[in-house]
Amino acid sequence: MNLNYIISTNLRRLRTDRNLSLGQLSELSGVSKVMLSQIEKGESNPTINTIWKIAIGLNVPYTRLIDSPMNDAVIIRKSDCKKQSENKNSFVSYCYYTTNPNRSFELFKVELQPHCKHSSDGHNTKTQEYIFVIRGELTIRLTTEEYVLQEGDSIQFDCSLPHTFINNLDTVLEFTDIIYYY
């Protein structure tokens, strides 16, 4: 299924389930009414940060917007993952597991190209992010602090706050990213 179609269908369903107009959701999310309308019609390819803003406005996990219905048993292959990228593929995210009534987390594999960074405005309240570096060196900027993680290192933080992932090396950085909703 086309990811834009999934997002448009989920957005429309989640918005109408909450009896929200496009204008009301625009106020809650900070995403323009025009952009929300274009996304619902499948006429726009929203950025990762735009999807996060909408998820926050709807008070739902990020993957509720990108997830298709789940079967009883699922094998997820990288080639089948929901792939999203920004800045000419300098930041690529593969969604392996999404939230559902029995799972309060999302699992992503992230690739960040050499000498690139990716900033997030922050996610839903009551969310924690768990990062595990697979390959490379990850610098994470959280508000005023910076942390440097090597292969095999991990960090957990309140991801409702703005944060930036930075790759200062000449090689591709790979890490897993679990977002936990509590």
Image (spheres, rainbow, N blue to C red):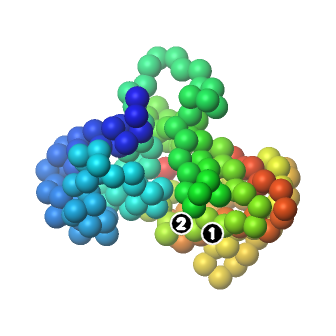
Viewer-side residue, 133 vs 129: 133
Q: Are marks 1 and 2 in contact (CB under 8 Å)?
A: yes
Q: Amino acid at mark 2?
A: Ser
Tag on residue 129? Answer: none
Count of residue discs: 2
* Horizontal relation, residue 180 to residue 140: left or right: left
Where is residue 123? Give x, y as percent.
47, 61
The residue under the point 14% across, 57% down is 21
Above or below for 50 versus 143: above
Where is residue 154? Give x, y as percent.
76, 55
Viewer-side residue, 38 vs 81: 38
SS for dot 2: strand
Where residue 55 sits, quadrant-wise, is bottom left
Viewer-side residue, 137 vs 127: 137
* Residue 10, visible in the rendered structure: no
Where is residue 169? Give x, y as percent.
83, 64
Above or below for 105 versus 32: above
Viewer-side residue, 53 vs 161: 53
The residue under the point 22% across, 62% down is 34
The residue under the point 59% across, 57% down is 88
Looking at this view, name the residue that lies furthest to the front: 88
* Residue 77, visible in the rendered structure: yes
Looking at this view, name the residue that lies furthest to the top: 73
Tag on residue 120? Answer: 2
* Horizontal relation, residue 107 to residue 121: left or right: right
Mark 1 = which residue?
164
